[in-house]
Amino acid sequence: MASKIFRDPLYNYIAIDLSRDRWLVELLNSPEIQRLRRIHQLGVSEFTYPGASHTRLAHTLGVLHLMQRTHERVEQIADDESVRICRGRLLAAALLHDVGHGPFSHLFEPCLGIDHEEWSVRIVRGEQTRVNQVLRGVDPTLPETVAQLIEKDNHDLPEWQRYLLSSQLDADRMDYLRRDSLFTGSGYGHFDWYRLINTLEFHDAGGQRDIVWPEKAKFAIEEYVFARYYMYQNVYLHKTTRCFEKLVEAMWNRARRLRDDGHEVNLVPAIDAFWSASEPTVEQYLAIEEFTVLQQIQQWMEHDDEPLKDLARRFLSRDRFAMIEAPPLGNDLTDGYAEWEEALRQVVRDGGFENTEAYCLKDQLKGKYNQPYFPEKESDEQSAKNAIRIKVSGETQPIEISQLLPRLVPITTESRDQYRYYVPADIREKAQNLRDQFAGRAGVSP
């Protein structure tokens, strides 16, 4: 049987059966998906982990592979017409779920004011895109059903189908955790993905199917939960990576402010067209790639505005800021922190950096990122979307995994937001001394 084979460092071989799914190769070869070759999966994480240069396309192929295996499992446990007809839309959604990502993946969403999922949906529904044309050639209804699987809060299709791609334990997360762990070299993303897929079961929830696992899968799930926790702590929230993310955001905000004030910011044509459009088109959005952004940053290195010029230089030269953790001021997140922040900005100004929007960067680490899996606690509100649940012998309802394994409770309870600040390394010592003074005033050992 003829197959299109891709060599992959995670799964060795990823295969597409040409006699059954030749259209998937056509979809993969579309310009919109091939663009993902030129988008880093982990944004600027290679500033921290030099090996983290893998792309969104590699991840997309991995998700397709896992979705193929997942659908095979679904056919084993529910071999009916509804399962068979959803196969095409699931595989297409696996390939297309990230097609709307912009340069450096999540990094440029605040810079461009976009949501990658919304753009993925627009690209799938756009009749002028090649992906839409390929999908329509398979089935005229396919673009819409694929869009429904990707679109946030769309409930037009059975929820279990969406949950295979986007839930607390899905094909997307299983691939990116393992892939990001491999390419960063961090080694934290290991878990038994094969067991998770091949023990998946359905549970009847008020006449609707939901996804659960048997008790024998509980330790594979525990591995997965810890992998998520470790990857967030050691990779996704790494201080150096977050520093350059905030630096890029500050650079882009500076350029936007200058432009709004009537100054020339030497925009490259693709970015100028996108910023100038009241409703940017799909074509205008897809024209912004990573090399476009890098060219723009290079041009800003010659700009007359010193903060913009300096931030551009720092990014391209990897001249990072120093990280200062917020002092432990108790539960007061208003007045206490406002005083601390103003004092820190004054230290920055005294150090010769007048523009504190460019040189005193605040990073809010939301509690949900420190505890990347925190389930819905009320059992009647739980589903695969907001909880990982286990079918236990003798119980009529599945049980959320941290209730079955209490040692998971500490890392499945949402914590408080944390704050970091990034300032030029020249004033690191003074900024750290200020932080220690505030901690001492609060009666907390620095």
Image (cartoon, rainbow, N blue to C red):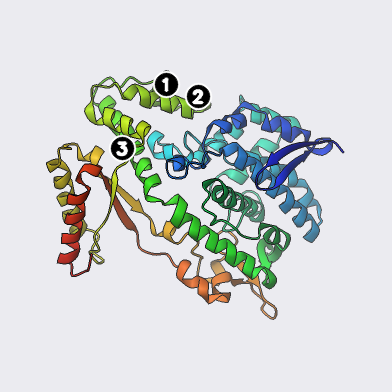
Circle 2 packing at 10 Å, graded few (<14), some (14-19), many (20+), is some
The answer to whether residue 146 of the structure is visible from this angle is no
Residue sitting at x 26%, y 27%: 258
129 relative to 407 in the view: left or right: right
Measured along the vertical axis of the image, is residue 278 above or below residue 388? above
Tell me the distance, in whole angstroms, between the alpha carbons under discs 2 and 3. Answer: 23 Å
Nearer-N-terminus badge (1/3): 3
Tell me the distance, in whole angstroms, between the alpha carbons under discs 1 and 3. Answer: 21 Å
The amino acid beneath tag 3 is Ala
Residue at the spot of label 3: 250
The answer to whether residue 46 of the structure is visible from this angle is yes
- Where residue 27 sits: x, y (%)? 69, 32
Measured along the vertical axis of the image, is residue 425 above or below residue 287? below
Nearer-N-terminus badge (1/2): 1
The amino acid beneath tag 2 is Ala
* Tag nearer the camera, 1 or 2: 2
Residue at the spot of label 1: 273
Tell me the distance, in whole angstroms, between the alpha carbons under discs 1 and 2. Answer: 10 Å
* Tag nearer the camera, 1 or 3: 3
**Mark on residue 378?**
none
Measured along the vertical axis of the image, is residue 95 above or below residue 432? above
Residue sitting at x 34%, y 59%: 417
Q: Quadrant of the N terminus?
A: top right
Q: Secondary structure at mark 3?
A: helix
**Mark on residue 287?**
2
